[in-house]
Amino acid sequence: MEWWFHAPMAFCCLWVFALGLGVGSFLNVLIARLPYEKSVIWPSSRCFVCFQKIGLLDNLPIIGYLRLRGRCRQCGAAFSSKYLWVELGTGFAFLALYFVEIVLQAKDGPEANGMLFLPWHNTPGLRFPYVGNSALPPWQTWVFFAFHAVLLAALIAASMIDLKHRQIPAQITYLATFVGLVASTAFPWPWPNDLTSLGALPTDGRSWILPEVEGKIPEGLSVWPFWGPIPSWAAAGSWKLGLLNGLIGAAVGMAIGRGIKLVFELGMGKEALGLGDADLLMMAGSFLGWQAIALALPVGAMLTLCVVLPMMAYKLARGRKVETQLPFGPGIAAGIVTCWFGWPWLGRLVQGVFFDLYVLGFVILLMGGGMLIAGLLLRRGKSA
């Protein structure tokens, strides 16, 4: 296969990276202004020291920062390097999203052409035509990418604000939740697959927890439908199923966050989880559905501990003060992304639980009771 056959896809990847840089520049505005309840539209970008307007060329992502060497052209005040890293990070995040969800899923793409890339999703679905020769990307490719890119951008902005200000602005989570509900309704599961992809699923009302169903549920814009077998009044591909997926995903995300907050506060007697964290789960649930979000919080907690515990040990070894109250938003965001991209494997592990009402109810009661007991023990340990 000639190298030029892959040029159109390479151009698409380059365009996505440039788009990510531009979005990252806008995220910097959100990160800088929303915590102070300032408008993100007016005034235009200015230096925070001399308040002079930053020119158009000086405001270009990456290029503007390097041209100015990280300083204001008027007064010479230093700009934080986080502006540069947010732009670069968002650009690479968008590129990774496009590569994993579009390039690796392409029909007759890198896998078929003998390259070292294999499809990320080993379940049915998410297979797009490969962009080769002079072919243009199908519109489904860009819609699929665009809505997931909105979720990814919102997670980046919320995490950065929570890291610095210990808050997650509702302007981000509520607006993104609305976008997620619109996307779920307009492009219901199993979109972008057609209904023929459901051929491996039982049509006689049998439960989806059976071994013969394992690994046969196609993934769409929402990873799974809200229940299987799908009820006849909300058929696959209908707007009713899409709206229910988004609403139930958002409701479960909010219920998990607020439920854990309530249980821990009953046990510990003090605030344990912020409402912004619950809103973050609500936002992601409107895009991905409730199943992936149900795992996001415990997965995020484990990832947070893997980062925080070594940092605490290092500070204690150096005799430094250790913070006991840490922002959990970045950890939740990491858990959401992990469950989102890891669903081809995680989904198989939890399929027998998430489609069995009795087992699911038992697991909820068990986890809720365990968290309440843990909170009571922590309160008793502090008072002893």
Image: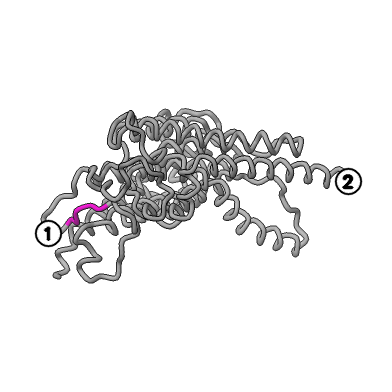
Residue range corresponding to the magenta coloring: 127-131
- Give the residue at mark 1: 133
Q: Name the spot of residue 70 as percent of width and height, x first.
A: 46, 52
- Residue 77 in view, yes or no: no
Please state which of residues 167 and 75 is positioned toward the viewer in this rendering: 167
Give the class, few, some or many, for how many residues have Cα within 10 Å of label 2's Cα (few <14, many ≥20). few
What secondary structure is found at the residue carrying circle 1?
Answer: loop
Dividing the picture into quadrants, the one containing residue 42 is: top left
Magenta residue check for 161: no
Give the distance between the C-alpha atoms of the residues marked 2 and 1, in whole angstroms: 72 Å
- Residue ID at (64%, 44%): 366
Depth check, front residue: 71 or 343: 343
Number of marks in the rendered image: 2
Using a 10 Å C-alpha cutoff, classify the residue at mark 1 as few (fewer than 14 neighbours), some (14 to 19) or many (20 or more). Answer: few
Q: Position of residue 169 (x, y in %)?
A: 53, 33
Q: Are marks 2 and 1 in contact (CB under 8 Å)?
A: no
Seen in the picture, residue 207 relative to 36 is either above or below; the reply is below
Numbered disc 2: secondary structure: loop
Note whether 250 is above or below 223 in the view shown. above
- The residue indicated by pointer 2 is 384
Amino acid type at mark 1 = Asn
Q: Is residue 327 visible?
A: yes
Magenta stretch: helix, strand or loop mostly: loop
